[in-house]
Image (tube, rainbow, N blue to C red):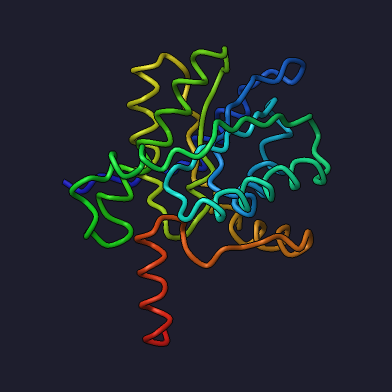
Amino acid sequence: MIQNKRNFQRELDNIINGLPHYDPPKLLLHSCCAPCSSYVLEYLSQYFLITVFYYNPNIYPEDEYLKRVEEQKRLIKEMPLKNPVGFMENGYHSERFYEAVKGLEHIREGGERCFACYRLRLEETARLAAENGFDYFTTTLSISPYKNAEKLNEIGEALSGIYCVKHLTSDFKKKNGYKRSVEISNSYGMYRQNYCGCVFSMKEREEALKKGT
């Protein structure tokens, strides 16, 4: 029997519709980069008190990581949002990424190596959300057409049970979210990288460019 696919946007709409207007809940939002966070911040800051958590030990090389951190800070500072947005970042720890994907190095982007990377970043987000009294946690990753929203929500929901903090269901590419993120990024002249972030995705992108794809 074929199961109907979940409509994550509808689930998010239902959560938002049930929120109190007078007391917005606290959300720890994992961000993969400023461009991807732009639409998500515009959208969710209407309903939540957001702290952006920049935790991406997958980024290669370190100067790329630092460049993306600064762009994230700039966006938060310059973008007009309904509620103030905080920022958290705990340094560059690439060894955690290589340990998490050990044995998966040769799997193409979009497979199990990426899922292990999702888990690494979401688990640290869930842990900190629980420790610091946030009501919800989620990630901007689902805004990308290349990221698996079903897997991201599956991992988030599993971690919610482990850390006892609510996971905010999402598929931010819906409602033209990705298109809007590009528009906002262009309006702020933001740096947009041409690879996901890790050394493996960088090499795949370089191979594709050599082939003219």
Residues 56 and 122: in front is: 56
User: Going by the image, does 20 lie left or right of 142?
Assistant: right
Residues 163 and 176: in front is: 163
Q: Residue at x 53, y 46 (%)?
A: 32
Residues 200 and 189: in front is: 200
Q: In which quarter of the image is residue 98?
A: top left
Q: Which residue is drawn at 42% across and 60% down?
A: 146
Residue 99 in the image: x percent, y percent?
A: 28, 39
Residue 107 in the image: x percent, y percent?
A: 23, 59
Where is 183 relative to 33, above or below?
below
User: Going by the image, does 211 lie left or right of 46?
Assistant: left
Where is 50 relative to 95, above or below?
above
Residue 111 in the image: x percent, y percent?
A: 27, 55
Q: Residue at x 54, y 35 (%)?
A: 91
Residue 190 in the image: x percent, y percent?
A: 71, 60
Q: Residue at x 68, y 41 (%)?
A: 41
Quarter holding the C terminus is bottom left
